[in-house]
Structures are given as C-alpha cells and as structure tokens.
Amino acid sequence: MPVTPQPYHRRGLRTRALLAGVAGVVTIGAVTAAALPASAGDSSYQRAGHGHNKPGRYQDVQLLSFNDLHGNLEPPSGSSGRVTELQPDGTTKTIDAGGVEYLATHLRQARGNNPYSITAAGGDMVGASPLISGLFHDEPTIEALNGLDLDVTSVGNHEFDEGARELARLQKGGCHPTDGCYVKGKRFKGADFPYLAANVLDEKTNKPILKPYWVWKKHGVKIGFIGVTLEDTPGVVSADGVKGLKFKDEVETINKYADELDKQGVKSVVALIHEGGFPASGAYNFNCDAAGGGSGISGPIVDIAKNVTPKVDALVTGHTHAAYACTIPDPSGKPRTVTSAASFGRLYTDTTLTYDRQTGDIARTAVRSANHVVTRTVPKAPDMTDLIARWNTLAAPIGNRPIGYISGDIGNTGTESPMGDLIADAQLAYGKKLDPETDLALMNPGGIRAGLTYAAKGAEGDGVVTYAEGFTVQPFSNTVNLQNFTGAQVIAVLKEQVSGVNAAAPKVLQVSSGLTYTLDLTKTGADRLVADSVKLNGAAIDPAATYRVATNSFLAGGGDGFPTLGKGTDDLVGTDDLAALAEYLTANSTPTTPIAPPAAKRITIVQ
C-alpha cells in the first residue's frame, strides 16, 4: 500500500487566454446522458405571447471554483507551483502554474460577460500562508479574493489557525487587535464574500458561528450554497484555534440545511466541503470516471458524497490538495459531480449547471465539469500586480534578510523528504543547545509547507535562503518543545504513523540524523513498523530507557493522530520553530560552503 500524500493542514500561527494551449479536459462522466430541449443553455430571452420577452426553461449557470489557496498570492516555487498533465500517448508533463495575477486573468476570461457565473471556494483560503500574507494576518489574501470577485467560500481548518475571533475579523473587517492597521489611516474592510460555517457551532449558543448557507439569485434562478469544514478540524488545528467551538458531522449538517433550503423554495444546492479525496492519478486531467463513477477516487469524500442527500446537486471539495472532477453516486444511486482544484491557485474548476426554471432544480444529466490550469502564459492582472507590490514593500525589510545558503533544491515531497530531514536536524541541534541530553527530533509532514529552491526568487542571488523563503516553509509560530519518553513510547509513536486514525493515510514523521527504521507497507496497521529495525546511532532502541525528544508544540500536544506524543514528561518549551531553522542554516552554511540537500535515506520503505 503506498503512502498517501498528506494534505497540507497545519496548526498554529505565525503572526506577527484563454488557456494558452493548455486546455482543461472534461473528466466528468455525467455529460449529457439525457438530451435536453433545444433551449437548454440558451441565456437569451425567448419570445412569448402578448409581445413580452420571457426566459427559456433551461439556463446554463457557470460555477467557477478553487480551494486551498493558503495565501499564495505570488506564484508558488518548486513542485508547489507545478501541475502534472496527462498526455494523449499516456505520458505526462509538468506545467508551471499559480499566482493570483494569473488566476485573476483566467477567471475573468472564463467568465467573459456571462451574467450567470458564480465563483465559489472550498476553504483554506488563508492560513499556512507565505510571508506576504501571513505576516499581515492574511489581510492581503482577503483583499485579493475581493478583487477576484469570489462570491462565497466554506471555511477550512486553516481559517481557525488564529481562532474564531480572528476569522470573524477577516469576515467583517477591522484592524488587528494587537498589530493594528498596517496602512496608516486605512481600516481593513474584510471580505466582500460570505464565509460559510454550517457545522461549526459556538459551544455556548449551539449556533453556527457564521452563516450556514447563502443563496445566489439572478433573473429567477436560485442556487443555494452550504459550507462545511471537516469534522476532525480539532485534530488538525491547535487547541487555542478551536477553543469554545464544536464541529459537527458534515453529512448530517449538509442534509439539515438542504432540507431548510428546500422548504424555502431553493431546489438547486451546491455543497462546499473542506474535506476531500485521493484520485488514482496525480494528473489534473485524469479521468477518474473511466471505469465507472467513483471508481478512480478514494478517501473521506467518497463516503460523504454517498450519504449527502440527493437534494444537493454538486460538491466542491478541498483539503487534500488533490485535483479531480469525478462523479460519485448519491444515496439514490444517481451520479453527482464532485470536484477539487488542487491547491495554491494552480487550477480552477469550470462546472456547468443547467437550471430548470420549471422545477427550480439542476438537470444533473447535463452537468459538465473540468479542471483548467492557471498557466503563467497569460497577461498578469494589473490590479493583482499592484496589490502584491504594495504588500511586498511592507514585508521587504523582514523578508529579504538572508538566513542561509544551499547548494541545490531541498524538496518537501516524498515519504521522507530532504526538507523534512533538514528541519528535524535543525530542531535536534536547537534541542541540544537547550539540553545536551536531547537524543532525537520528530517533525510532522503537514507542517512542512514548501521546500527551498536554489534559484533566486528575487534579487538575493542563487542559493540564498531568505527569511521570507523560510517563512513559506514553516509559517506557524509553533515552539520547539523537549519531552522525555521511554523507548517503548518512541516505538509506539512510530507505530501511530501507520495505525489508528493514520492507518488509511499514513503520516510519516520526518526524523533527525541518527534515527533509522523500516516501514513495511505491504502489511497493515501498526505491523507496518518493523519494530526491531528502530535504531538510534546504530543501536537498537531500548524500550526501558529514557529518550529526550524534540518536537514542535503541535505534536507535543498529541496532534495529527499521535496521542503518545501528548504523554511526554519534563517538558521544556523553546523558541519559535522558524527561528530554530534560521539559526541552524546560519550556523551551518556560508556563501562558499552552502548546505547540501540531505539524502533522505533515514527511513527504509518496503512496498
């Protein structure tokens, strides 16, 4: 069983064309399975009796959607800024993608002058953001989304990185309670679009903290949007971020509000769900319906889609950072569109919903959907270029500071990644500085937001790592914590990577130099860890001995399905994790002696 790529969810906070030759490929199976009347899709008004104009029965509504932007206003670097495209001969190629200057152009070209066009998102618009947005509590991203004419979005888990009060500020506006206004005399206006949080309740009032749904209306056409985030948000966000909140089941919540909308006469409904799946291919244009609806996708969204009421006509999803445009049968067995546009603004989904004015419902047999690449070959949107320049000017004094030097790209992909090894080594070095008895360090893969690229991003020069680049890698103010564990507990932690809540989608921790072990993925559950393979500096882990372990504060609290890490003793809380990385890079590299990418050979994988 391969290790499933992990969704980029992390916890905590750091504060303070047309498609230029890359056309999207239709990958949804429910394409015109039953013929509609000739008027379907005709947005013109048809002549009726008595000399009056009357709209035709069927109206095509364009739904443009994306998800998991994570404040990536500038084009993401490395693999985070590329998508894989499947070619007609079965080969693949990679395409540079993303950046809101290009996303704005693509969305505007896709809309054209269509009055029946809606733009929606599936959550995680903010949080885990690069410096240009994260340094300013994601106000720049909200400003950019306003400029993109986003109509509505669900919340994601990252919208809670700074807690419900900060989320409310992003929605309603107002300057930050601690950092104030970033532009003198200019109050932050907040989001022009509604954030939907149907399944996020205030523990005291038992009511949603934000609107549960929103209805789009145009010339008699009414489409309702219900927004939810994953029920397990408390498991992937710091405790402070979800304090005073409870998260309800996604299906029960969507079904409840679909019934409510139905009673209000809204028969067409789209669910915006910040939970997703894993397609069988990493190519954005993979036909996941080739062997039948729902056959090419796995993961939590499959069960959700199969149980959400047939009153919902389409599902826009997210969280897993995967790309798909599939059909999954609803409870009545009928196919229903389920989409996700990867992450970081690299794709957008264009879905056609054919609205029947007679019934008020969507004619699902006519639904068409495809993902399209946000190529960088179209003109940049000038308003987004200006926005980026303004915020970069404010961030430059902090972001441009060099913190180290590398001899090549240090990637963050793979079961064990070079970037993961580097961070774990940095935390081990920092731990030894706090306490010389520190033995090893463990880093969660979801907390590694990007790799480091050798090529200069700005004027800093090739191989130079700036603070802004480091911030993009670790954009949370997690602290580096030291705790004592027995050897038996260390082995238990390594088993938790591939068992319990992590059994279906293993979360393989990144380990510091000296710790080695083997995972046999042909087995199941905790048996995947080859227990007698776990060694520290060549010696087998002694179950009865005590080991001093460095982790970030999220893991130290048992996050990401590692309850044993929440049971350490003799806690010692250190500095910010990015400060530890910066300190390590500065101490161990110079322009003439840069750090080489780690080999990533500490974990042996049997498949």
Image (cartoon, rainbow, N blue to C red):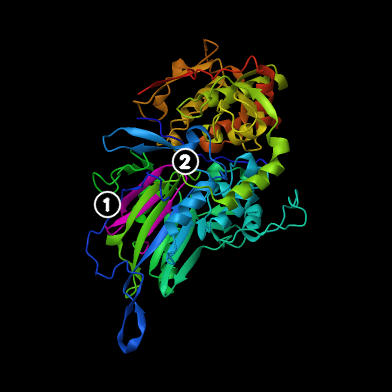
- Is residue 326 rendered to the left or right of residue 511? left
Compared to residue 532, the image places residue 272 above or below, namely: below
| Residue at the extreme right of the image, as rendered | 184
The residue that mark 2 highlights is 97
Mark 1 residue type: Gly
Q: In which quarter of the image is the N terminus?
A: top left
Looking at the image, tell me whether mark 1 or mark 2 is earlier in sequence order.
1
Please name the residue that numbered disc 1 is placed on. 29
Q: Residues within 10 Å of mark 2 (few under 14, many from 20)?
A: many
In whole angstroms, how far apart are the C-alphas of marks 1 and 2?
26 Å
Residue most extreme to the front = 379
Q: Does the magenta stretch include residue 396?
A: no
Q: Give the range drawn in magenta.
A: 311-339
Q: Which amino acid does label 2 sit on?
A: Ala
**Crowding near the residue tagged with mark 1, few <14, some 14–19, many ≥20 C-alpha atoms within 10 Å:** many
Furthest toward the left, the residue is: 34
Is 316 within the magenta?
A: yes
Q: Residue 244: in sight, yes or no?
A: no
Q: In this view, does 588 lie to the left or right of 97?
A: right
Foreground pick, 113 / 99: 113
Residue 364 is situated, as x and y percent measured from the top left of the image, at 30, 62
- Residue 269 - label: none
Q: Callout 1: helix, strand or loop? A: loop
Query: Taking 72 as reference, is 473 above or below it?
Result: above
Residue 27 position within the rendered picture, expressed as x and y whole percent measured from the top left: 31, 48
